[in-house]
């Protein structure tokens, strides 16, 4: 699925990739879909700075998103997350941004990315792929996905919001981050 902004930009330049490569990219999707890994690969391909929003929050708050959610609840975390996204988007050098799994579900965050003229990319991985990565990480606490059923309900409840992204890339467990990053630039 291509968005109209990309199509119109693509028609304007001689090199079809050059205009899209000059945009800022926001990578979104469910936990475990590969947002951070793909964003890092994309930043390497573009030779630019990338920011993982969850890591940015951890550095700024001195505790992880999971710790904030456990200590203060999800609504408090979402406020912190939105403020962090505002700061990250003000940094024009950050050309690739990996969102947290729930960031895009907040309408104000979607508006914010639109106001900064970002190309939004949904990495749509099947639930089973995400779940295997969630449980396989071992070290990562996921308070919003403490068990398979809770994670599955949350996965399905977020899909309509994710579908609002400008780009939609289907992700398979065999896809490499580099290959997915190249698809972002097509």
Image: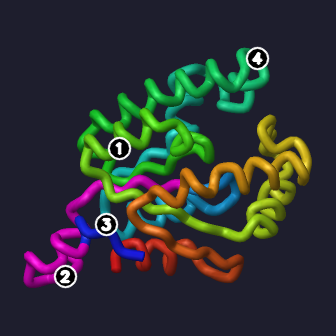
Q: Nearer the viewer, mark 4 or mark 1?
A: 1
**Residue underneath mark 2:** 16
Distance, label 4 to label 1, CA atoms, is 28 Å
Q: Are marks 1 and 3 in contact (CB under 8 Å)?
A: no
User: At 78% across and 44% down in the image, what residue appears?
Assistant: 140
Whether residue 185 sits left or right of residue 172 in the image: it is: left
Query: Of marks 4 and 1, which one's residue comes earlier in the chain?
Result: 4
**Residue underneath mark 3:** 46
User: At 9% across and 78% down in the image, what residue appears?
Assistant: 13
Distance, label 3 to label 2, CA atoms, is 15 Å
Query: Of marks 3 and 4, which one's residue comes earlier in the chain?
Result: 3
Q: Nearer the viewer, mark 3 or mark 2?
A: 2
Mark 3, secondary structure of its residue:
helix
Q: Nearer the viewer, residue 91 or 143?
A: 143
**Residue underneath mark 4:** 71
Query: Of marks 3 and 2, which one's residue comes earlier in the chain?
Result: 2
Whether residue 122 sits left or right of residue 17 in the image: it is: right
Query: Of marks 1 and 2, which one's residue comes earlier in the chain?
Result: 2
Distance, label 1 to label 3, CA atoms, is 20 Å
Q: x and y percent of residue 149 in the render?
A: 90, 51
Look at the image and give the residue range highlighted in magenta: 7-28
Disc 1 residue crowd, few under 14, some 14–19, many 20+, Cα 10 Å: some
Residue 128 painted magenta: no
Whether residue 91 sits left or right of residue 8 in the image: it is: right
Distance, label 3 to label 4, CA atoms, is 38 Å
Q: Is residue 140 above or below residue 31?
A: above
Q: Are marks 3 and 4 in contact (CB under 8 Å)?
A: no
User: At 42% across and 43% down in the image, what residue appears?
Assistant: 110
**Residue underneath mark 1:** 113
Mark 1, secondary structure of its residue:
helix
Disc 2 residue crowd, few under 14, some 14–19, many 20+, Cα 10 Å: some
């Amino acid at each position: 699925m291509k968005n109209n902004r990309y199509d119109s930009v693509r028609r304007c330049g001689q090199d079809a990739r050059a205009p899209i490569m000059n945009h800022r990219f926001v990578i979104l999707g469910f936990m475990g879909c590969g947002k951070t890994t793909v964003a890092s690969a994309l930043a390497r391909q573009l030779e630019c700075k990338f920011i993982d929003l969850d890591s940015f929050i951890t550095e700024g708050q001195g505790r992880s998103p999971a710790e904030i959610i456990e200590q203060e609840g999800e609504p408090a975390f979402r406020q912190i997350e939105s403020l962090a996204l505002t700061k990250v988007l003000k940094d024009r050098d950050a050309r690739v941004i990996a969102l947290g799994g729930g960031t895009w579900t907040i309408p104000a965050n979607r508006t914010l990315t639109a106001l900064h003229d970002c190309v939004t990319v949904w990495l749509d991985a099947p639930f089973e792929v995400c779940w295997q990565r969630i449980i396989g990480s071992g070290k990562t606490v996921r308070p919003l996905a403490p068990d398979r059923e809770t994670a599955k309900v949350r996965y399905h409840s977020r899909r309509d919001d994710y579908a609002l992204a400008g780009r939609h890339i289907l992700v398979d467990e065999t896809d490499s981050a580099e290959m997915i990053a190249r698809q972002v630039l097509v």
